[in-house]
Image (cartoon, helix red, strand yellow):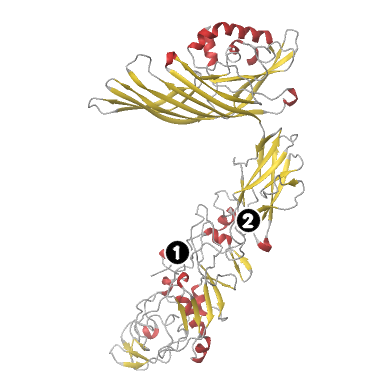
Amino acid sequence: MKKTLFAAVVGMIFAVSPPPEAQQDIPYSWQGYVEVSQKMLPAAGAPTTGEVTTRWKLRVNWKEAKRNDVKDRAGNLVGQLVKLEDGGSSWEGTLTGGYAQKGRDISYAGQGSGADNAIGFGWVYYSLSDKDPLKDILPNGSYCFGAGTGTVAAFQGKITYFDYSNVPARTTTSAWPAMLGYYVGGDKLGMPFGHVKGPDLPGPSSAEAIREAITRWDQFKGIAQAANSWDTEARALEGGAMKGRYQRTALNGGLINEVSWDVSKLLDILCEIDKPDEKWRPRGGDDSNTIVIKARIKDQAELRGKWRFTLSEVSRERGIALNQGDDTDYDLAFTEGQSGYKRPDERNPLVLESTDSKNEASIEVKSLDYGAWGKLKGEVNLEGRWYTARTADGKDYITVPLDDDGNRIADRWEWEWSLQGKPEDADEDDMPAGIGEDSAKGDGFSNYEEYRGFFVKGKWTETGPFLKDLFILDEAYHGVGNFDKLELAVHLIRRGEIDLRTKNVNFNRGWASQGPQNGLHLRDSDLADRDGWVLLGEATGGPGPPNQIKEVLIDVAAVYKTFDDLDSVIAHELGHAVNIWHHGENDHDGLARRGGLWSGDVSCVMRYSRPKEYRGVDGKKYPFPVDEGATARVDFCSTKTGTGINAPGERTGPDGHPYPVAADATRGSCRKSVRLKGRTP
């Protein structure tokens, strides 16, 4: 009898059941935690010191597997006995400590986790009658649960032996069969039920048989408890929940068990919330848009509850785009005036609750920014308890817009640009091909900034993550001329879309920014003659990337007076503003020399317009050729190699003068020099 009763005790249990019969068709589960600490100590008087501790954290999810009616001799229903089984629990465990013995130390270490093997048994008893013959020994809500020799949660444990001699330490690794040896629920319910026929078979249980089993257990329990570490208090539900703790010492002081638990009964229902339409993306300003999200209690149409929707982690980017607006309000909000909803707290605009109970609820969320982002949680209140709606993949929230990787960029945009897995702060624009070195990838705008977008002449546009973008405020009013030959994504903006003081065009930057990125301010200016030179244009602060440029100035009147090509002059100065230098710098006296300002590819706009003279390979001065060809100064070069009158190879030109005129460029390769972000020496 002793062995049989002990076996009934060991095992882990959780118990509960719904209130009376009216709700028997509604499934319940019990969820919460059980924590167990088991300390193993050396036997009293043994020449060993130390302790080994196993700790468990059980995240329990127990289902009500069976309900048995309990009847008296006359056949009256007096109670209900509910059996609990695992419904998806999990556990984590650790093993630490060690012993010191004469001549050696022993160290223990290990950890592990698992699921569905942490419950041995569990019962709850509900009294349903004032004439219940068990009321004196089983009050309403009595429960027990436990685990023991039949319930093992094993993980990899490591035992290391350190001998005090010169023998190296020895380590063994094996599955650590840590038995969940604890029992909660006193001495009235769990122990005797190994001998009660009813709970494990169909049909009612006899109240008399239960009383007889408990009585027999009372006669034996004193002997059994002395050898075990189970709970000695009778337990009953408090406010419908199982809560408590106990500490027991067993095995003559060799085992100390500490157990605490907090488990509540929940309706075993599935609440689900739909993810946003993958095609939807946020917008702001006059383009502000909305999206409707639906949530429901699944598979139980008869259940209706009060719904609550909560927005959290909502972005508060400045303005509505990178270069528009200045507000810092929430970028997402619930649409005002939604029928059937009110704010539970007027001071908090991020929470709405339904004014009627519903099985399914819809909520409308409004976007106020082109880069708006936030989380939305849906909950339903049933019988005074809130249940969280989950997505099909188990999350207890959704992102608005759909953003499964949580980088605040709508997944749709990433799919369209094949950016899955790329960080939100990446800046790897490398198009057009051949523009800039590999080390000069990017345009100063992160993926998130390209997605959030900019205003260009009053109209919002999202930029692309592959084509390099450059913003220009054109107040010279003659366009960008031949600068378009670089095929950059040039955006002509207007005042208000660039910070004229700093020249920042992403002045509303925030989340995932690469930092300030400047646009260019192109304007007409009267540039006086300097030392006999007629200055047609100037990129002040350059050559360098836009972040180094103060202004790009063009003296339009001077260009016309000199009969120069305005498109080429504009392209030349804008070239300086994206880090392109002259082909050479050794002939500012107006005399063309090899490798100087007029060297290299004659079609490149970075060459100066035709000078008066050049110095030939013989060291003499010659008139500069009148005709350089129709393609002079209309494009940007890709190499240092001279073309036309500058082509390699000494020869006599058509005018009888020695060629090449200025030969290969010292720098050249202007397309490779382009850099849009950062600064250069």
Q: In the rendered view, would you say 590 is above or below 175?
A: below
Task: Please identify the quarter of the rendering in which residue 130 is found.
Answer: top right
Residue 93, image x, y percentages: 47, 29
Of labels 2 and 1, earlier in sequence is 2
Give the quadrant of the C terminus. bottom left
Residue 175 tag number: none
Residue 73, image x, y percentages: 73, 7
The CA span between labels 2 and 1 is 31 Å
Residue at the image point whose x is 50% and y is 89% from the top: 558
Q: Judge from the rendering whether residue 50 lies leftward or rightward of residue 349; answer left or right.
A: left
Question: Which kind of residue does numbered mark 1 sit on?
Answer: Lys
Question: Which kind of residue does numbered mark 2 sit on?
Answer: Asp
* Numbered label tally: 2
Crowd tier of the residue under label 2, counting other residues whose Cα lies within 10 Å: few below 14, some 14–19, many 20 or above: many
Residue 283, image x, y percentages: 64, 59
Camera-near label (2 vs 1) is 2
Q: Judge from the rendering whether residue 119 lies leftward or rightward of residue 49; answer left or right.
A: right
Q: In the rendered view, would you say 460 is above or below 131?
A: below
Residue 331 tag number: 2
Q: What element carries label 1?
A: loop
In the rendered structure, are the residues bearing label 2 and label 1 in contact, judged by CB atoms less than 8 Å apart? no
Crowd tier of the residue under label 1, counting other residues whose Cα lies within 10 Å: few below 14, some 14–19, many 20 or above: many
Residue at the image point whose x is 34% and y is 81% from the top: 595
* Residue topped by disc 1: 441
Viewer can see residue 373: yes
Residue 256, image x, y percentages: 45, 20
Q: Which of 128 and 485 is in front in this view?
A: 128
Residue at the image point whose x is 59% and y is 63% from the top: 462
Task: Please identify the quarter of the rendering in which residue 65 is found.
Answer: top right
